[in-house]
Amino acid sequence: MIFPVGDFIMQEIAFIESTQPSVFAKIIAIALGAVIFVVACYLAHGLYNARTLLRREFSAYFLSPIAYVLFVVFLAVTGYLFHRTFDLLTTAGPKGTEFPMQAMFADERFWLVFLFIPPILTMRLFAEERSTGTLEMLMTAPLLDWQVVLCKYLGCLGFYVVLWLPTLCYLPALLGWHALELHAPSGFASFVFLLGVFIFIAGVALQFPLNLEPFWRLSGLLMVVSGLVIGILGGMYHFQSDGLHLINFQSEIDPLPVLSTYLGMFLAGAMFLSIGILVSSLVKDQMVSALIAMGLSLLFLVAGFWRPEQDGGLFYRTLYFFSVPLHFERSFTRGIFDTRPIILYVSTAFFCLFLTVRSLESRRWR
Amino acid sequence: MIHVKNLTKYYGDFLAVGGVSFDVLKGQVVGFLGPNGAGKSTTMRILAGFLTATSGQVTIDGIDVFWDPVAVRRRIGYMPESCPLYPEMRVVEYLTFRAGIKGIHGSLRAKRVDECLNRCWLGEVRSQIIGTLSKGYRQRVGLADSLLADPAVLILDEPTAGLDPTQIRETRKLIRELGTRHTILLSTHILSEVEMTCDQAIIINRGKVALAGPLEDLRSKNQTLEEMFIKLVDREESALAGG
């Protein structure tokens, strides 16, 4: 059986168009969207002013040996799981797997390694700065506390994303991709799409040179945003109306679980990293920070090692609320975007970041 | 320029600074003296906005440190005691990073970094990794860092601690030079340093101002600063012992 990726997206669009939300729901959604937009603009402005710190926090990982050790261990384990999954996919008989992502990421060996990754990434953030005294330099710079916390957090999250990037090369094999077909651009929409991509790349390139005038840096950012908008609009129109697509690929296995697994991993990582950063802001010693963060993470991961009876009883249902491995086993790796765990991850992340800002602030008073 | 009124800081139950008041006028170089544990570093940390006072008021350039900390921090260059730096960065990288944090971007940043590197004689170690630098060079990196944004006020916590005699002489020369453009508050244990570099001295002991005034006034009483300092500290000790 062949799964054309495009058909899934078309189905989703048709489904969203077919539902008729009430006027009240629409107003609530618009108001919520406006509030989130304003807050996001405020945060983005603060981040833009503190971009030097963001860049240093991200690049600091590449200057420390611990990140490379983590890379090697992480890739070794996911590589081994890939090997096993690939075996499962290719064996004949009843021993195969329906969901390759489930075979890879709902495995307890994966969660055992995952338990260590976020605490090790976050342990140095504040604990090291406090023990060497550099926190004093940082906290007397003209930045607000939340800017410092957000820059450190996003730098760390950025490295976490980089950690996951090499695993993308397993995907063609896991999904049984057919060779990509490339076609020459034909039709107006494909040119709009290519223009958007070009503006986006040029805007990204403008962010790299050091000592660039703020005017050029800002126009580069504008190019990134406008390129994204033009590219997405042109791409959607091109996708819907043009007969021949620029890139065409088909896969033999349902591709949606990949999307939901990666989204879930990103959000779950965001939650665990925020727990780690909170602990790091509370203690002075890196080792203690990592261990306490691991202990707290274990609360969310315990169902990955100790499998509860899946009987649908009260205990199991309660455990399901905060058991990340169960969320992955039951929904994300099967292509279900379950909003309950997503809300849990995002709200825990925000709450922990809020507490981190407060904990940093309270240092000034003591 | 710096105005401190009834500054008090408790660490838990421990009184670190108890009602310190002093003023530093624009363009002055003021030495901040006192025995170990007198509250010098605590006071300077409050001025720089790293700590918040338990009570009392601090204004720098007319702006309250408590109510508008970011605006105050833009106007001061602060060099903490023992000068902590990121050991894995190169000198020029570190200064570029600090300049960016202080809101200097673009070609101005490269210019300011070069200026401060030359000013603090860091030219020949500019691309060396900070972890491999000697103590003296690190102190200079910290000093260069505090000068980056060309602030009106410099707060230097023991800028000459741990340096060798030549470096001390050079640093003093630099501070005297800087005193013509910036208002400087510097703390030290070395009394002769104050006599060489400062216009004014503030002596604090046990969290209180024991003596403050222009150096000429202090000198005119026909005794050196060292004699006065020892006398002051002794008197407090005996008063405590007697009471």
Image (cartoon, coloured by chain):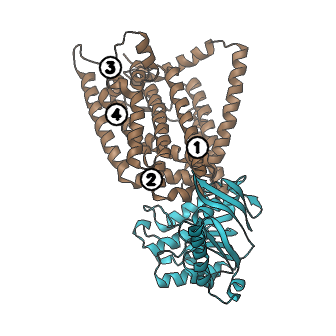
Chain colours: A brown, B cyan
Question: Are discs 2 and 3 located on one and the same chain?
Answer: yes
Determine contact: label 4, label 2, CB under 8 Å: no
Marking on residue A214: none
Kindly identify the amino acid type of the residue bearing the numbered disc 4: Tyr
- Dot 1 or dot 2: first in sequence order is 2
Nearer the viewer's eye, disc 1 or disc 3?
A: 1
A49 and A214: which one is in front?
A49
- In terms of depth relative to the viewer, which is nearer, B238 or A101? B238
Residue at the disc numbered 2: A128
Question: Farthest right residue?
Answer: B62
Dot 2: chain letter = A
Residue A287 in sight here: yes
**Tag 2 near tag 3, CB within 8 Å:** no
The x and y percentages for residue A185 are 54, 35
Which quadrant would residue A316 be assigned to in this image? top left
Which residue in the structure is indicated by mark 1?
A357
